[in-house]
Image (cartoon, rainbow, N blue to C red):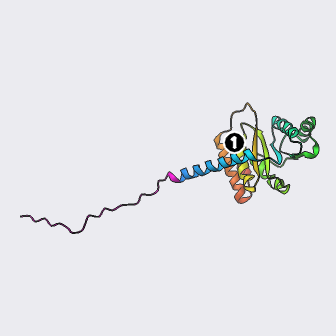
Amino acid sequence: MFLKIRSSKPEVKVVSRRKPKKRLFPLLCLASLGLWLGYKQLQSYFVQPEAIFVLGGHEDRERFAAKLAVEHPDLPIWVSSGSPQHYVTEIFTNAGVSDHRLHLDYQAKDTVTNFTSLVKELKAQGIDSVYLITSDNHMNRARIIGEIVFGTQGIVLKPLSVPSDDSPEPIEKIVRDGGRSFLWLLTGRTGENLLLP
């Protein structure tokens, strides 16, 4: 005869806590980035810029900025590393823009240094918002850099794209220069010497 003895203790189920899914952090980062970009887009919609900031290097950008300067006769114009000085001055003079409004700066060697070389000067002038002028194929990279460099210093961007026949820049350039902009925030250096030719 077999005797079955029942235990008086109830069965205990062990419930293990699930580890947070590894996908949660990247999703939170993307959501945060999306909210931040949405906020910046809304902010740029309502801002009334106090200056025109041109990423030089293409005559079309400088001509576009000259037309905008005529529409906004009280705004100073900053051209970062544009065409040769006599040529840029001629474009603005022919459009009827006074020389005293025009500030030409040739310190920048690339898009990141377009922003980092002038951010302190713009802040010293009391400028808290700018029209950002560059080609449409270059605007995504310029905006990311501008939001990091200018945005963290309290300067709001209102982007205005100049039409171009060139294809949009690859995402790798945007990521690289976004990283260089964060490097500038942390160290004051842009890493321009790390760029490959």
Question: Residue drawn 76% across and 44% down?
Answer: 158
Q: State the extent of the magenta-drawn residues as a range.
A: 1-24
Location of residue 194 in the rendering, given as x and y in whole percent from the top left corner: 70, 50
Question: Observer-nearest residue: 93 or 112?
Answer: 93
Q: Main secondary structure of the magenta part?
A: loop
- Total marks placed: 1
Is any atom of residue 195 visible in this view?
Answer: no
Question: Observer-nearest residue: 104 or 70?
Answer: 70
Dot 1, how many residues are within 10 Å of its Cα: few (below 14), some (14-19), or many (20+)?
Answer: some
Q: Is residue 66 above or below residue 187?
A: above
Residue at image mark 1: 140
Q: Is residue 97 above or below residue 28?
A: above
Q: Amino acid at mark 1?
A: Asn
Circle 1 sits in a helix, a strand or a loop, which is it?
A: helix
- Where does the C terminus fall, quadrant-wise? top right
Question: Observer-nearest residue: 80 or 43?
Answer: 43
Judge whether residue 85 is colored magenta. no
Left or right placement of residue 172 versus residue 23 in this view: right
Judge whether residue 20 is colored magenta. yes
Location of residue 147 in the rendering, given as x and y in whole percent from the top left corner: 71, 50
- Where does the N terminus fall, quadrant-wise? bottom left
Question: Residue drawn 10% across and 65% down?
Answer: 3
Question: Residue drawn 81% across and 37% down?
Answer: 61
Left or right placement of residue 131 versus residue 23 in this view: right
- Quarter of image, res 81: top right
Location of residue 32 in the rendering, given as x and y in whole percent from the top left corner: 60, 52
